[in-house]
Amino acid sequence: ILQDEQITNFMLIMAYREEESSPIEDAFFNLAKANVDLKLGGLDLQSVVDMVSERLGDVSNDSLLDLDELCRMISHKTQGNPFHIVKFFEMIKEDGLLAFEEDSCSWNCDLVEIQKNTMIPDSVAEIISRKIKRLENHMQEFLKLLSLIGYRFTHEMIFDMATEISNEEGSPEKGGTLNLDMLL
């Protein structure tokens, strides 16, 4: 594309983390005639409060939840990175450190445990790896089989493999189904 003389205008928009720059990005920057470097910082505390509040719903009457302290902690641990905020929020819910109590209709949050025992993963690969490790053994085995196919497969292929595995004699999933939510 860059060598085609008929193309007079070309704009390439790339997003990357400075610490994860690769030779490909460097090559693109060297080829570009105009380069605008836009550095994005983390969200401010009020934006973090807005994100968390949106996920929790109306917590104005919730006496058990210290929303400000929770948001300060999330902001500090994620450095305001929106992707990490979402993943961190999901992680503390999955770990039971933030849970909605049906009886009292309020959120229960263990701020001490969150502060002490939660680390935000550094990369998307770590987040996915953590999710895979939490899966049941038969689901991990299913993912290993899918990895043999490669990175491209259709929903039909996944469904056919899951059906075949579920119907195998002696399979712990016989008569049941594999939970494929993570894959879709």
Image (tube, grey):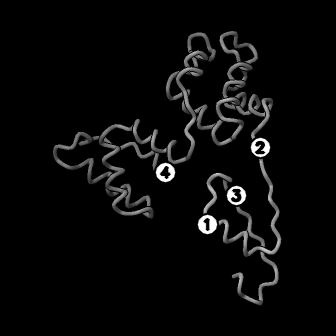
Q: Secondary structure at mark 1?
A: helix
Mark 3 surroundings: few (<14), some (14-19) or many (≥20) residues within 10 A: few
- Residue type indicated by callout 3: Ala
User: Which residue is denoted by mark 4 in the rendering?
Assistant: 184
- Residue type indicated by callout 4: Leu
Identify the residue at horizontal 64%, vertical 30% (top origin): 77
Sooner in the amino-acid sequence: mark 4 or mark 2: 2
Q: Which sits in the foreground, 47 or 76? A: 76
Tell me how many marks there are: 4
Sooner in the amino-acid sequence: mark 2 or mark 1: 1
User: Which residue is denoted by mark 3 in the rendering?
Assistant: 15
Mark 2 → mark 3, Cα distance in angstroms? 13 Å
- The image shows residue 165 at horizontal and vertical percentages of 26, 50
- The image shows residue 102 at horizontal and vertical percentages of 56, 15
- In the image, is residue 153 above or below residue 167? below
Q: Quadrant of residue 23?
A: bottom right
Mark 1 → mark 4, Cα distance in angstroms? 31 Å
- Residue type indicated by callout 1: Pro
- In the image, is residue 178 above or below residue 57? below
Identify the residue at horizontal 55%, vertical 38% (top origin): 121
Mark 4 surroundings: few (<14), some (14-19) or many (≥20) residues within 10 A: few
User: Which residue is denoted by mark 2 in the rendering?
Assistant: 41
User: Which circle, 4 or 2, is nearer the viewer?
Assistant: 2
Q: Quadrant of residue 104?
A: top right
User: Which circle, 3 or 1, is nearer the viewer?
Assistant: 1
Mark carried by residue 23: 1
Q: Secondary structure at mark 3?
A: loop
